[in-house]
């Protein structure tokens, strides 16, 4: 008599619940299981122990370009949108256009001394020694955080609305293609690179802010992915072209930030999707992305040196 059969009738019983008769067997170990122990499998049902063993032995799903496949490809974009929205709400709550957060988080190449509604290019010590003045910090004067925080700072509602809508559309597509960590690195490096080109090429003392550099980086990376898979890129190219036309034709729009983000986003995207398959792919992606990041940081440091 089988150990999973009732003595009187010989009917199989669940191996986990000996008092329950059943005619269903696990497709993997073939032991009888009752309805409470049945777990859906690709074919038939499996018992809880076999499901647990299978989960341990099955390699985590990977995206097309080596990253861990996200269970929800929109989470990272939602978090980034939440961070941008939180900063914007803080700016609204502290004076909106006159909020001190704008001058602290937005980016200037160098600090400015404001007195009587006019800005003066003098040292901070000289500015502080005068009465009725306000010092607006800049990167070259020690506000090293501004190249990154400026990419999370917005004032006008249309500005944050456009950028966050674009992030909501582009972000999940790229995260699904490259994975969460790679997508986050792409986004942050694109935003930082937009600030880099502004830092080198924009007019002195100009305040720059917004996530547009990061968004243009996502556009560049998505274009690289589309080219890699042989997709139809005409509509994407038209969309990118329209955005660049708006960039150069609308006043007070930073073409430097948009171009810097697009170029570096495209470069990071190329590193991620053209890295050779196999065990070395992650190492190549990490080395390439790190090299781009170090180059961006080195260029920012070099600019700081030239302005001192």
Image (cartoon, rainbow, N blue to C red):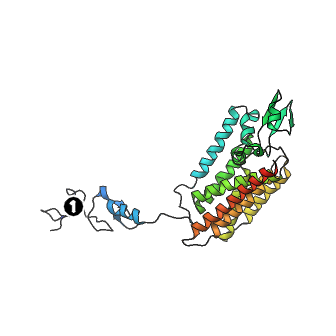
* Residue 212 seen in this snapshot: yes
Few, some or many C-alpha atoms within 10 Å of disc 1 (few <14, some 14-19, many ≥20)?
Answer: many
**Closer to the camera, 152 or 34?**
152
Q: Is residue 178 left or right of residue 191?
A: left
**Closer to the camera, 292 or 58?**
292
**Residue 2 image offset from top left, x and y in percent:** 17, 67
* Residue 64 seen in this snapshot: no
**Residue 101 image offset from top left, x and y in percent:** 71, 37
Q: Which residue is denoted by mark 1 in the rendering?
A: 13
Q: Is residue 60 left or right of residue 260?
A: left
Quarter residue 128 falls in: top right
Q: Residue at point 63% right, 56% down?
A: 185
**Residue 251 image offset from top left, x and y in percent:** 85, 47
Q: Is residue 122 left or right of residue 2?
A: right
Q: Residue at point 62% right, 44% down?
A: 82
Q: Is residue 203 above or below residue 96?
A: below
**Residue 5 image offset from top left, x and y in percent:** 18, 64
Q: Secondary structure at mark 1?
A: loop
Q: Residue at point 63% right, 65% down?
A: 287
């Amino acid at each position: 008599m089988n150990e999973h059969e009732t003595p009187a009738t010989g009917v199989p019983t669940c191996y986990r619940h000996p008092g329950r008769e059943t005619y269903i067997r696990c497709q993997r170990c073939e032991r009888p299981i009752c309805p409470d122990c049945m777990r859906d499998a690709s074919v038939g049902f499996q018992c809880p122990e076999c499901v647990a063993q299978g989960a341990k032995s099955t390699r985590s799903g990977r995206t097309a370009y080596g990253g861990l496949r996200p269970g929800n490809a929109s989470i990272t974009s939602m978090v980034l949108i939440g961070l941008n929205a939180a900063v914007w709400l803080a700016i609204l709550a502290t004076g909106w256009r006159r909020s001190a957060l704008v001058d602290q988080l937005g980016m200037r190449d160098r600090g400015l001394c404001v007195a009587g509604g006019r800005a003066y290019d003098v040292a901070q010590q000289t500015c502080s020694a005068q009465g009725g003045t306000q010092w607006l910090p800049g990167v070259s004067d020690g506000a090293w955080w501004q190249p990154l925080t400026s990419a999370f700072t917005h004032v006008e509602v249309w500005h944050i609305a456009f950028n966050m809508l674009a992030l909501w559309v582009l972000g999940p597509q790229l995260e699904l293609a490259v994975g969460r960590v790679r997508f986050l690195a792409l986004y942050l490096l694109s935003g930082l690179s937009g600030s880099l080109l502004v830092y080198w090429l924009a007019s002195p003392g100009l305040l720059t802010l917004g996530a547009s550099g990061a968004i243009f980086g996502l556009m560049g990376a998505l274009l690289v992915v589309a080219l890699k898979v042989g997709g139809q890129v005409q509509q994407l190219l038209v969309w990118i072209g329209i955005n660049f036309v708006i960039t150069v034709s609308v006043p007070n729009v930073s073409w430097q930030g948009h171009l810097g983000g697009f170029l570096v986003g495209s470069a990071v995207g190329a590193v991620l999707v053209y890295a050779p398959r196999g065990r070395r792919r992650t190492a190549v992606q990490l080395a390439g992305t790190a090299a781009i990041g170090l180059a961006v940081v080195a260029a920012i440091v070099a600019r700081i040196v030239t302005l001192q």
